[in-house]
C-alpha cells in the first residue's frame, strides 16, 4: 500500500524563483528565513520544506540572466513581522512597502538580491 500524497488538488504546490546569482540567493533566504536547499547542480536548488527533511520540496531557485517582471507575489507567514523585516535587511534584501496594516494583520513587501518581490504577513 502506498503512502498518501502530500499534494492537494488546486493548492499551491511549488514556487519557483528565478535568480541572477544562485549562491547569493541561497545565502539570503537561509539567513532571512532559515530555508534549506537541495542542490541540483550549478543552475538549480530545490527549497526544502521548513517542516523537516521528510517533507517535500516547496519550491526552487532557478538561475537565469534576467528576472521576469510581474511574476506571482509569494507571501510568507511570520510569527514576528518586525523581526522578519530586520532579518530581510540584514540578509541584503530591501523593504519596498510597509510594514502596513491590512484586514487580518500586518504585512510588508521586500525584494531579494536578484530583484524578486515577495511579501510577509503576520496576524498582528
Image (cartoon, rainbow, N blue to C red):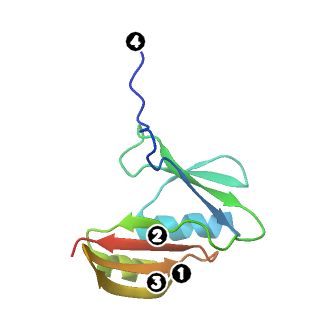
Residue plotted at (47% across, 85% down): 95
Residue plotted at (37% across, 44% down): 52
Residue plotted at (27% across, 74% down): 80
- The Cα atoms of the two marked residues, 1 and 4, are separated by 47 Å
Q: Label 1's element?
A: loop
- Compared to residue 119, the image places residue 38 above or below, namely above
Q: Earlier in the sequence, mark 4 or mark 2?
A: 4
Q: Provide the residue designation for mark 2.
A: 31
CB under 8 Å between callouts 1 and 2?
Answer: yes
Question: Of the numbered discs in the image, which one, if any, rests on residue 92?
Answer: 1
- The Cα atoms of the two marked residues, 4 and 2, are separated by 40 Å
Identify the image quadrant of residue 112: bottom right
Place of residue 68 in the rendered image (x, y in percent of width and height, measured from the top left): 70, 70
Q: Earlier in the sequence, mark 1 or mark 4?
A: 4
Q: Earlier in the sequence, mark 1 or mark 2?
A: 2
CB under 8 Å between callouts 1 and 4?
Answer: no
Residue 104 showing in the rendered view: yes
- Compared to residue 9, the image places residue 100 above or below, namely below
Q: Provide the residue designation for mark 3.
A: 89
Amino acid at each position: 500500500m502506498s503512502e498518501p500524497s502530500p499534494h492537494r488538488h488546486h493548492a499551491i504546490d511549488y514556487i519557483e524563483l528565478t535568480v541572477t546569482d544562485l549562491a547569493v540567493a541561497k545565502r539570503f533566504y537561509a539567513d532571512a528565513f532559515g530555508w534549506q536547499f537541495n542542490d541540483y547542480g550549478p543552475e538549480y536548488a530545490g527549497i526544502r520544506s521548513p517542516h523537516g527533511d521528510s517533507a517535500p520540496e516547496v519550491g526552487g531557485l532557478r538561475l537565469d540572466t534576467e528576472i521576469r517582471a510581474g511574476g506571482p507575489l509569494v507571501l510568507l507567514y511570520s510569527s514576528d513581522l518586525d523581526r522578519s523585516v530586520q532579518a530581510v535587511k540584514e540578509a541584503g534584501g530591501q523593504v519596498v512597502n510597509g510594514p502596513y496594516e491590512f484586514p487580518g494583520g500586518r504585512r510588508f513587501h521586500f525584494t531579494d538580491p536578484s530583484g524578486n518581490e515577495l511579501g510577509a504577513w503576520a496576524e498582528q
